[in-house]
Image (spheres, rainbow, N blue to C red):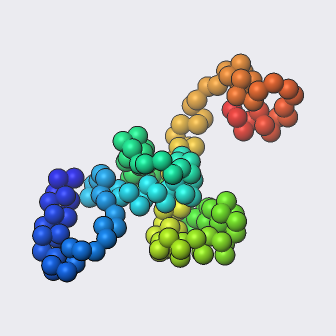
Amino acid sequence: MRRTLAWLCAGLALMPPGAAAGTFVDAVLGSIDARVVTASDIALARALGLFGFAPSTAPIDADDVGRMLDARLVLREAEHLDIGGGPDETEAAWRAASERLGGRPALERWLAEVSVDPAWARTLVADDTRWRRFIELRFRDFAFVMPDEVSAALGPGAHDAAAVEQVR
């Protein structure tokens, strides 16, 4: 990370004088194997509900950075084991992300409004599918949830088998 920050500082020092008056666009918050995690990565993950993030307007904190760095580590392992990331999975995830924001036209309009390259957003969505698949294959089948924990999570009342299985 220090090397990345050194390059960033060197680049800022070499900028033409007029460029210094420009607006600061993004910030590098961490890196894993030379892949940086930026504030905009976390903001986009929040907006699209990726990597376990929920939509939020709160400032990005250390827990958010840690979550994204953990996601990058999982992605590295998933790529190494060739888990997830197929085109069909990516397309289905892109459709789901579009639906969460009101459909594909709404997603495309929103991406244009916030100046996000759709290809970058789609790459993050593809990474999320690989992350989810890895978590599912490596951990979910080994988690034991007691019936009283499921009942507490569901709350009072009768629940069908599908709801119980989803919570489990």
Furthest residue in direction top, as rendered: 148
Whether residue 50 is visible, yes or no, is: no
The image shows residue 15, relative to residue 97, as above or below, that is below
Name the one closer to the observer, 60 or 127. Answer: 60
Name the one closer to the observer, 64 or 35. Answer: 64
Residue plotted at (64% across, 25% down) = 145
Whether residue 29 is visible, yes or no, is: yes
Residue plotted at (55% across, 57% down) = 47
Name the one closer to the observer, 6 or 86. Answer: 6
Furthest residue in direction front, as rendered: 21
- x, y (%) of residue 29? 31, 53
Number of residue marks = 0
The image shows residue 147, relative to residue 4, as above or below, that is above
The image shows residue 75, relative to residue 162, as above or below, that is below
- x, y (%) of residue 92? 65, 64
Residue plotted at (56% across, 48% down) = 54
- x, y (%) of residue 21? 24, 74
Name the one closer to the observer, 119 or 58. Answer: 58
Q: Relative to 78, is 56 on the left or the right?
A: right
- x, y (%) of residue 26? 34, 63
Q: Quadrant of residue 42?
A: bottom left
Quarter of the picture holding the C terminus: top right
Residue plotted at (35% across, 56% down) = 37
